[in-house]
């Protein structure tokens, strides 16, 4: 609108100038009013010229103005406006006037079409620019969303793969290790700041911590809880979850000390309460139904592994262990293997028996005592245990120079790689007795359940067969 | 898969590591669309064993890494540092150092800015007073973040959180603290285990602004930290879902 307002005076000025130019020129030259010798072209050309810039209306107006000044005012000033001039005018502009009018109309028509086309192009361009901007905006937003999602997935702390890895770590007969893994898993999935697993101490009739997390260094692990006045004892007796929000709608817990308990859950093994998981500190935002559910899921996932561990521990407590190394003797290995194979029949999965034999045991026994050599074998096993993520439970085998490992979760190929690692570690380690280097000659025999091997005897035979082949 | 193979046979043999790189490569025509799709959907959590060191390094190289991801990386480094493999342990130690240094540099820049703003205020330069609170706020927040990142070193953690507290308590902010400052102040007190102080502060705030939801939530949080569970409900009037969970009516996720 403003543009149009500014344009109007300019166009008027331009049209006056253009109309006046031949007139002024005619006055200056002083002869041939209306430029009839030139067929009136200087006056007739202005209109079409103007129409090419501003369209038909302005062109026609200028033609009229120009013709008026050229063919009326100009001869009038010279006093020649008479019939003779009119005749001469008619004769001279006979062709140029219609030509000028046709030119004016043609140019105006052409100008109109160009204007329409340019408007169309401009509209299309505007639309394209709008659409491109909108695409750029969309692309940028989607890129941001992608980046955020990528970071969210990368930064995920409670993924299913992590859960799987943690559960795999539970597959060990080492109780301390399994419970610590369980506490670590609880931390990863709930962000708990501190907590503990309490189990009954039969001798003292109290509850003792079997695994702790986030305790201060000066907090003693020897601390014991009275099951009668503690929430842990209540949960163990009743096999019921305790969550601190229960304090708000019930006076049932008033007689208990609840200062350490946020969420306390029973750890059930074969339907009986074996221990209690107590979450002592948890961020406010994480205290939720979700956390309670996650804890229940984790304990349920841990149950089969804890069952194996408790069975193993029971056997260990009944049978004798080697007095020098503290490792369970062969009968326990046999019973544990039997139990493991039974479990595998129902639950599936693998268990491997690995026998490590010190071939030059007798030779070394001439220099060092048998006890020292047995302890050396035990140390070797511990070193390997510390280095390897896949841990097994160690036992004594039939002879003093033999150790056996029960490793869960490895198939036949996995077990052979495991044995290869074991041999590499043995050959690479510098074992010493009383500061003196002991050159160990180690051979390894192994067997894995499955493909017809389902009894402890079959597994032991297979592993021993491999050993005897190597002795040859 | 064909596109993947043809990509490998290219002269450049350029293999984009990230989604963003793959997208750029796609727009430049260096890779096939299917490779971009493959890369885009093949993201996995970094907190997974065996550790993906390339992914860890990629995240570590990000200059604008957020605090949560940094904490996650630090958790991984704390585990890696205990590895038998000395190279891995060294990588972890260097990465921990790099993370801390990066944060420290940010803090130093902010401290310098704060000092300049303070000097300008003393010289009564026009418009300088307005600059002080945002800088002090950013500095306090950075100190707290550094404290959170150093979770494995309790002494350092407490030191940095106390620094954040002292920055926040300085004159620049105490004259006209805003909601964020007060919330941060309460959080810092809770981080330091000064629950009683937090309770007094929150009590004053909720007394003065009983309608402020953020203060009410902080009051509930403080009551939780002080194990005064019955007081939590008084401050959860607005948050019906959470209230229902505490009353044992509806699960709260």
Image (cartoon, rainbow, N blue to C red):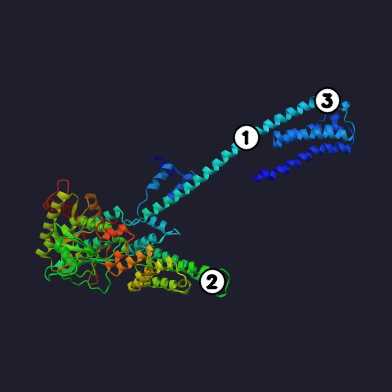
Q: Classify the position of the N terminus of chain A by image quarter.
A: top right
Label 1 Cα crowd, 10 Å radius (few <14 / some 14-19 / many 20+): few
Q: What residue is rendered at 76% in x and 29% in y?
A: A100
Q: Which of A445 and B82 is in front in this view?
A: B82
Q: Please tell me which of labels 3 and 1 falls first in the chain.
A: 3
Identify the subunit bearing mark 2: B
How far across and down, in percent of the image, does residue A429 sit?
27, 64
Q: Classify the position of the C terminus of chain A by image quarter.
A: bottom left
Instruction: Kindly indicate whether the residues beneath marks 2 and 1 are on one polypeptide chain.
Output: no
How far across and down, in percent of the image, does residue B116 sit?
53, 71
Q: Name the residue under label 1.
A: A116
Q: In this view, does A77 lie to the left or right of A163?
A: right
Query: Is residue A115 something that shows in the picture?
Result: yes
Q: Is residue A15 above or below residue A316?
A: above
Label 3 Cα crowd, 10 Å radius (few <14 / some 14-19 / many 20+): some
Disc number for residue A90? 3
User: Cβ–Cβ below 8 Å for labels 3 and 1?
Assistant: no
Query: Is residue A319 something that shows in the picture?
Result: no
Image depth: mark 2 or mark 3 in front = 3
Q: Distance between the residues labelled 3 and 1?
A: 37 Å
How far across and down, in percent of the image, does residue B9 sit?
44, 43
Q: Is mark 1 on a helix, strand or loop?
A: helix
Q: In which quarter of the image is residue A336?
A: bottom left
Q: What residue is rendered at 73% in x and 30% in y?
A: A104
Q: Mark 2 points at which residue?
A: B116
Q: What residue is rendered at 17% in x and 50% in y?
A: A347
């Amino acid at each position: 609108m403003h543009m149009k307002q500014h344009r109007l005076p300019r166009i008027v000025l331009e049209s006056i100038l253009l109309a006046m130019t031949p007139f002024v020129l005619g006055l200056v030259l002083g002869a041939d009013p209306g430029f009839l010798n030139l067929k009136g072209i200087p006056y007739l050309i202005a209109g079409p010229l103007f129409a090419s810039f501003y369209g038909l209306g302005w062109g026609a107006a200028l033609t009229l103005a120009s013709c008026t000044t050229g063919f009326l005012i100009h001869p009038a000033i010279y006093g020649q406006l008479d019939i003779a001039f009119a005749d001469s005018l008619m004769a001279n502009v006979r062709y140029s006037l219609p030509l000028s009018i046709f030119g004016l109309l043609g140019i105006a028509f052409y100008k109109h079409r160009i204007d329409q086309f340019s408007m169309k192009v401009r509209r299309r361009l505007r639309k394209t620019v709008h659409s491109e901007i909108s695409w750029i905006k969309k692309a940028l937003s989607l890129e941001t969303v992608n980046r955020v999602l990528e970071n969210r997935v990368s930064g995920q702390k409670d993924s299913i793969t992590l859960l799987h890895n943690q559960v795999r770590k539970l597959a060990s007969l080492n109780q301390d290790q399994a419970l610590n893994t369980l506490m670590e898993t609880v931390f990863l999935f709930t962000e708990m700041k501190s907590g503990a697993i309490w189990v009954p101490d039969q001798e003292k009739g109290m509850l003792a911590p079997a695994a702790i997390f986030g305790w201060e260094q000066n907090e003693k692990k020897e601390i014991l809880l009275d099951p009668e006045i503690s929430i842990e004892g209540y949960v163990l007796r009743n096999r019921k979850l305790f969550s601190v929000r229960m304090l708000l709608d019930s006076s049932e817990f008033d007689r208990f000390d609840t200062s350490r308990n946020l969420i306390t859950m029973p750890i059930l093994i074969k339907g009986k309460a074996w221990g209690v998981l107590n979450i002592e500190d948890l961020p406010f935002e994480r205290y939720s139904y979700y956390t309670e559910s996650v804890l229940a899921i984790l304990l349920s996932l841990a149950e089969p592994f804890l069952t194996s561990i408790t069975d193993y521990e029971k056997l260990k407590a009944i049978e004798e262990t080697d007095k020098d190394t503290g490792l369970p003797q062969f009968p326990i290995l046999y019973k544990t293997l039997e139990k493991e194979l039974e479990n595998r029949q129902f639950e599936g999965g693998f268990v491997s028996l690995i026998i490590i034999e010190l071939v030059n045991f007798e030779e070394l026994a001439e220099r060092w005592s048998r006890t020292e050599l047995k302890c050396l074998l035990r140390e070797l096993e511990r070193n390997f245990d510390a280095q390897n993520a896949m841990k097994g439970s160690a036992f004594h085998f039939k002879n003093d120079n033999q150790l056996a490992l029960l490793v869960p979760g490895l198939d036949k190929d996995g077990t052979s790689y495991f044995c290869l690692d074991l041999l590499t570690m043995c050959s690479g380690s510098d074992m010493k007795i009383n500061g003196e280097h002991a050159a160990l000659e180690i051979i390894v025999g192994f067997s894995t359940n499955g493909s017809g091997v389902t009894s402890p005897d079959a597994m032991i035979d297979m592993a021993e067969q491999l050993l005897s082949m190597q002795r040859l | 898969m064909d596109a993947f193979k043809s990509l490998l046979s290219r002269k450049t043999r350029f293999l984009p590591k990230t989604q963003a790189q793959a997208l750029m490569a796609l727009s430049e025509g260096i890779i096939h669309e299917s490779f971009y799709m493959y890369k885009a959907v093949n993201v996995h959590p970094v907190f997974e064993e065996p550790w993906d060191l390339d992914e860890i390094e990629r995240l570590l190289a990000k200059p604008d890494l957020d605090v949560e991801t940094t904490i996650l990386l630090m958790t991984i480094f704390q585990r890696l540092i205990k590895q038998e493999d000395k190279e891995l342990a060294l990588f972890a130690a260097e990465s921990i150092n790099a993370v801390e240094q990066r944060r420290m540099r940010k803090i130093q820049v902010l401290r310098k800015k704060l000092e300049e703003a303070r000097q300008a205020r003393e010289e009564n330069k026009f418009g300088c007073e307005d600059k002080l609170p945002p800088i002090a706020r950013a500095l306090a927040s950075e100190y707290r973040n550094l404290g959170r990142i150093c979770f494995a070193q309790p002494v350092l953690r407490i030191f940095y959180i106390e620094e954040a507290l002292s920055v926040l308590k300085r004159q620049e902010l105490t004259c006209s603290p805003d909601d964020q400052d007060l919330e941060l102040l309460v959080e810092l007190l809770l981080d330091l285990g000064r629950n009683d102080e937090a309770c007094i502060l929150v009590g004053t705030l909720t007394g003065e602004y009983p309608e402020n939801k953020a203060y009410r939530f902080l009051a509930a949080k403080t009551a939780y930290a002080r194990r005064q569970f019955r007081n939590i409900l008084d401050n959860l009037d607005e948050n019906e879902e959470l209230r229902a969970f505490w009353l044992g009516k509806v699960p709260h996720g």
